[in-house]
Amino acid sequence: MIIRVNGEECECAEGVSLLSFLEGRELDVRSVVVEHNRTIVMTDNLGSVRLVAGDELEILHFVGGG
Amino acid sequence: MEHSNNNDPLVIGGTELQSRLFTGTGKYGSDAVIPDVCRASGSQVITVALRRVDMHAATGNVMQHIPKHMQLLPNTSGARDADEAIRIARLARAAGCGNWIKIEVISDNRYLLPDGYETARATEVLAREGFVVLPYMNPDLYVARDLVNAGASAVMPLGAPIGTNRGIRTKEMIGILIEEIDLPIVVDAGIGKPSEACEAMEMGADACLVNTAIATAGDPVAMGEAFGAAVRAGRQAFLAKAGPVLSGSASASSPLTGFLGA
């Protein structure tokens, strides 16, 4: 199925958890913050969110800035 | 790091700071230098930005270079209106890095000047949600009053446009804020040299935020140390109260009596 991740279409297995999706992308879940369909998902809840087709994710992290 | 005024803390959002120099994490040739800059400058507050992860390439993690004792000050750069700033602030807090936020709402991409109305709107919402809000602003008295009423914990007037290293071009206007606004005044943006940070502190500003001038210096660690010393010197001079400025004539420093006979 197709979801949108950071504005780009992305192939993702049906019914996978947000936690599994992030780990599958080799992202350290402690260093990112995630919005799922405009709702912030706290790290502890990543495993309980199931992704469905058309979901939109924003995956962010801190970078250098002033 | 030594501090010349240990009995003169700056208190923002209930946190006592001994250092009045805030630093940033942008524009460094190598982020690995950041811990040394923090140590050399004595800074206790450091800014970061929030951006999308690049899903196609592994990138470095700036957080691993920030010493644990630092107070993080995430900014809302990239926000073009209050709603975007609020969204970024909530994400930054959810990322687990505390409740301080530098509101930055900019829709002018040439001069990067902050939008006072949208900044005040975002400040009001976020202060109510328990954030310690430090808004980046034009040094305008009415905007500053709006920010006070909106619940800001400090105001951060610009000295010159972001990243320009042009110094305190808005000196008169910042002076008015220092006189009229009963919140910490943190001069942010435009400071290019330690003498300019010192000048802001001599005027009575409560702190300075310096990123570009340190990060793009030939030796960022030495420049960080110089800025730390300049901010302390300026603060000490402000507390010491400068003597009167005379015009029209001189005033001898040595006695005008007891000269040698002719």
Image (cartoon, rainbow, N blue to C red):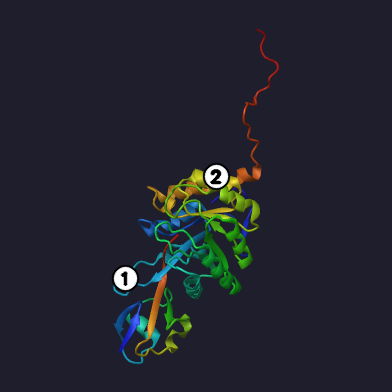
Q: What's the distance in space between the residues labelled 2 and 1, CA to CA?
A: 42 Å
Is residue B99 visible in the rendered image? The answer is no
Q: Pointer 1: what residue?
A: B58
| Rendered residue at 43%/87% (across/down) | A47
Report crowding for label 2: few under 14, some 14 to 19, many 20 or more residues within 10 A (C-alpha). Answer: many
For badge 2, the amino acid type reads Glu
Q: Chain of mark 2?
A: B
Question: Depth check: B2 or B16 in front?
Answer: B16
SS type, badge 2:
helix
Question: Which image quarter: residue B242?
Answer: top right
Labels 2 and 1 touching (C-beta < 8 A): no
Q: Position of residue B177 (x, y in %)?
A: 60, 53
On the picture, is B246 further left or further right than A31?
Answer: right
Q: Which badge, 2 or 1, comes first in the chain's sequence?
A: 1
Q: Which label number is shown at residue A40?
A: none
SS type, badge 1:
loop
| Rendered residue at 49%/73% (across/down) | B83
Q: Which label number is shown at residue B199?
A: 2
Q: Position of residue B195 (x, y in %)?
A: 50, 43
Is residue B27 visible in the rendered image? The answer is yes
Q: Position of residue A25 (x, y in %)?
A: 32, 79
| Rendered residue at 63%/35% (across/down) | B245
